[in-house]
């Protein structure tokens, strides 16, 4: 069942099994606030098991581009289009958030972003290849993030 993320009243709905559920909920709310403020888009997520096509698309890009496959269990996903971008998010039980920004037009920006919830360690799958910058968030505390540019067509 879809869940509209409320960034005014942060909730752990759908994320309860995460050891960093509150921080992950804050990170998810931070993303919801960004899309509402920038694009007037309502950020809605659903259980990963209910949207396998979104999860498969993100996993294919991670595998093809960087040979990455996360061992953490995906809890929630979302996929939407705003301003010429196809966006997809996967929120993992470990506290990791993966997002794909895929410009629809030829030559548009395309990248994969990783955000780590406060309190989680850098996943083994990313520790040797990525450096993480720190960002403060009122909703999520400290977020660590990294990204890579997508080279292929998906």
Image (cartoon, grey):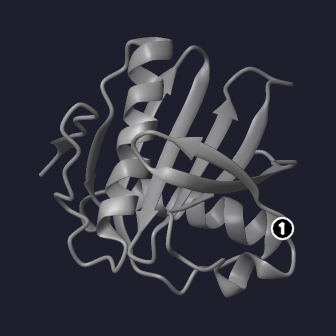
- Give 114 or 106, whichever is nearer the viewer: 114
- Give 108 or 97, whichever is nearer the viewer: 97
x and y percentages locating residue 134 in the rendered image: 70, 52
- Corner quadrant of residue 65: bottom right
Check the image and report above or below for 118 versus 104. Answer: below
| Mark 1 residue element | loop
- Give 34 or 57, whichever is nearer the viewer: 34
**Residue drawn at (43%, 15%) of the image:** 37
Direction from residue 127 to residue 6 in the image, left or right = left
The number of numbered discs placed on residues in the rendered structure image is: 1
**Residue drawn at (46%, 58%) of the image:** 90
Direction from residue 64 to residue 22 in the image, left or right = left
x and y percentages locating residue 67 in the rendered image: 78, 76
x and y percentages locating residue 74 in the rendered image: 40, 71
What residue would you read off at disc 1? 130
x and y percentages locating residue 150 in the rendered image: 81, 48
**Residue drawn at (67%, 25%) of the image:** 104
Check the image and report above or below for 18 versus 97. Answer: below
């Amino acid at each position: 069942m879809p869940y509209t993320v409320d960034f005014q009243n942060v909730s752990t709905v759908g994320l309860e099994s995460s050891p960093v559920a509150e921080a992950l909920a804050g990170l998810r709310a931070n993303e919801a606030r960004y899309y509402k403020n920038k694009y007037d888009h309502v950020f809605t997520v659903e259980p990963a098991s209910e949207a396998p096509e979104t999860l498969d698309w993100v996993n294919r890009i991670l595998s093809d581009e960087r040979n990455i496959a996360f061992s953490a269990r995906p809890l929630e996903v979302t996929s939407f289009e705003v301003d010429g971008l196809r966006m997809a998010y996967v929120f993992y039980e470990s506290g990791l958030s993966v997002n794909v920004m895929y410009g629809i037009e030829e030559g548009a920006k395309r990248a994969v972003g990783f955000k780590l919830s406060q309190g989680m360690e850098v996943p083994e799958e990313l520790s040797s290849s990525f450096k993480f910058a720190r960002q403060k968030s009122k909703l999520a505390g400290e977020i660590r993030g990294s990204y890579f540019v997508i080279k292929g067509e998906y």
